[in-house]
Amino acid sequence: MADEQPRRPILNPVLRFTKDPRPEGITGRGKGRTGIKSERLDHQRSALSDAFAGLNRKREQLATAAGRTMIYASMFSDSRATTWTPTDIFNADRGASIIAPYRSGYIVEIEISRLGFYSSLMIAADFDRDMVDISRVEDVRAYDSNDVAHGIGIDRLWELAPEIGAGRAFTLWFMPYRDNASAEVVLQEIGRLRDEEVVGSLPPAPLLQLPALPVAPGEETGQRLRLVSNLTDRISSALRDYRARHRAKTGVIIQDRKRLALILGSAAVFRLDPMPVIASTSPGEGTEPQRPLPSSLASMPIVGVVDGGLTASSYRPAEAWRAQPLVPTGFADAGHGNKVTSLIVQGHDWNNRLQLPSLYCRVGIVQAVPRDGSGYFLDPDSLTPYLDVVMAAHPETKVWNLSLNQRMDCDLNQVSALGHDLAILARKHRVLLVISIGNQPSGRMQPPADCEAALTVGGRLHTSDGAPGGKCPVSLTGPGPASMLKPETVHFSHVRTIGGVVSAGSSFSAALTSPLAAHTMAALREPSPDLVKALILHNGDNAVYDIALGYGSPGTSMPWNSPPGAVTLQWTASLKAGAAYYWELPIPAALRASGKLRGYGTLTAILDPHPLVSEIAGPNYLSARLETAVQFERDGKTHNLLGSLDTKKITEQEARELDHKWSPLRHHHRKFKGIAFDGDNLRIYARIFTRDLYLYGYNHPDEAPEMPINFVLTIGTGWESDAVFNQMHTSLGAFVENSTIDTMVEVET
């Protein structure tokens, strides 16, 4: 009789939950007499009246466009919630409109002829909603050149900008007037600044010829080419953009400090940013090894590698495609590109003493990062349209590795222009960007690590046995701007790469994460970038977010499998603001065997906030957020088994800092034991909240579009012998299906 082999543990896949939610209407709270801060109303009437009177006295000194100017209205710390936005006191009937959130308040467009009227209104207004606003606005002042320059002096602003040609490079943002006549003045003023050579356009990008779409074999000669080239005068392109939507930015060259001062005082300029340099995140040299690659490589998923290109001939067999370079050969950081590529193709082979899964990948080569010291200047206005076309040309490539950063600290009150542009690109092409967080000696994470749609990766050390270790001293940390939890995940940052040398940096952490993302994307039946991102961080080894380690490392278990002794469900739903949504789930018998709930649960949800994101909204970049929880019943009341803080009991500032209230990512984990409950079901709750809808032309949350959310829920005991997976699969029946491709589900009944 043959020897019995030990039973291989069953690997149960993630299950797709297909049941529709049950919506319930919500009665919203608005402004009323109870919202008036009576203890300071009289003082604020006087203070704001004086402030408007002061603005009126110096109206000739204000930067104006067609009789309108911008002012800054700051809010008290207890009045920063969306409920208290002062839309009643600042409305179009009174010659004012709120344009965008700014710092701890709002930028307001106002007719200068109404400044005296507003001084009187602060004293005389007697409607409840007006008095709510007056008691909650702390101060008003002019939006001035100091705001345009972010509080940086002219000399420092000049020094921060990179040299290019005869001047220095900046990003100029046009003043976002809502009034058409004022917007026309902005157009004329920007045109005048260009014609008088106060500002100049950046040089045009190289003319790129890239296939617009994949071409079938044999049809190469007849393929249509799409040309990518910025206009000779980029300012003209930005002027057209501004005429269409009253918002625009463009890269400019400023020749000297005198011209810089003129621009800062212009009523046409909203922001002026030193244009950061794009560079790879670590240097290094190494000899090229001869590495055999597996014969199955042709069937492996592809990662688009946006880096310094690939010159190592040993990795040519792994090359799935190569785009026309953006940065010319000789200027590109090929050494860094070779290192990153070696890790994406076979990082586990190079680091066989580390706990890494065996995941081979092919690569698409995008040569777009200049070598440090090469003298080649690459501006973001060239990079993003280039990537737009390359992504369109390669729709089979769903994961893109960007081990690059701009040499500047992320502003915690402002998402970077490159981070925003890449998020728009990722959502457009439905791809997952894997971006490095950046390296020391910078003080904070570097753009575009603040890209909302990206999986941002930081570094961590490894232990002597190859397991995940502590914080990396080289990698930067989070959090990100606008309440975003960055990095979401971390990976080994001190690794062996091509040439056999040990290199350190978050570049390599991102390169180790990209293959896992690509294989997860390939394993799922209906993949999406947010679902892949959710599954990876859902499997992280940190239950609670850490600014250095995010939600931890994904480990060697595959994200598309349910853990032993547990079941993982995933589903996608498109929800509207203004309603609460509920899904009912049976409680597996193993979790209530003792008569009380015993086990653990993890709930991860990612909201796609587009189109409700605004590059001019500062700390309020995200205009939609998600609240979600797993709930149970007891004594006729609903309680959270997994969920957020009760943000209604703390201030808006505390909710943002402690609960990351406006993060598009929610992640809740808890172990529970001995919890009494009633009934047989758990309930998943979700609700979308919105704010600042005037930025998008909406007047009420009902007008906002539905927004997609990806949910991942794991519940279990952790004991492999417990049949949690089988119990949930059997109970849900037709409401679950296998999420993965070609995986047998073994259900024991």
Image (spheres, rainbow, N blue to C red):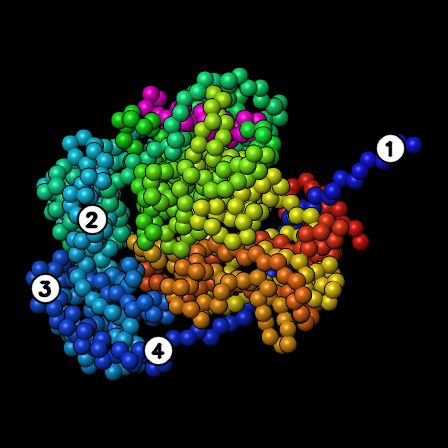
Q: Which of marks 3 and 2 precedes in the sequence?
A: 3
Q: Which of marks 3 and 1 precedes in the sequence?
A: 1
> What x and y, as percent, mark residue 388?
39, 38
How far apart are the two marked residues, 3 and 4, measured between alpha carbons?
Answer: 33 Å
Instruction: Name the residue type under label 3.
Output: Arg
Above or below for 224 versus 30? above
Q: Are marks 1 and 4 in contact (CB under 8 Å)?
A: no
How far apart are the two marked residues, 2 and 1, measured between alpha carbons?
Answer: 77 Å
- Circle nearer the viewer, 2 or 3: 2
- Residue picked out by circle 4: 35
Q: Main secondary structure of the magenta part?
A: helix
Picture disc at residue 59? 3
Instruction: Name the residue type under label 2.
Output: Ile
Above or below for 673 versus 392? below
Above or below for 95 versus 349? below
Secondary element at tag 4: helix
- Circle nearer the viewer, 1 or 4: 1
How far apart are the two marked residues, 1 and 4, measured between alpha carbons?
Answer: 77 Å
Stretch of the chain drawn in magenta: 323-350
Q: Is residue 204 magenta?
A: no
Q: Is residue 332 magenta?
A: yes
- Residue picked out by circle 1: 3
Q: Is residue 24 left or right of residue 587?
A: left
Q: Which of marks 4 and 3 precedes in the sequence?
A: 4
> What x and y, as percent, mark residue 311?
43, 20
Q: Would you say residue 637 is visible in this rendering?
A: yes
- Circle nearer the viewer, 3 or 4: 4
Q: Which of marks 4 and 2 precedes in the sequence?
A: 4
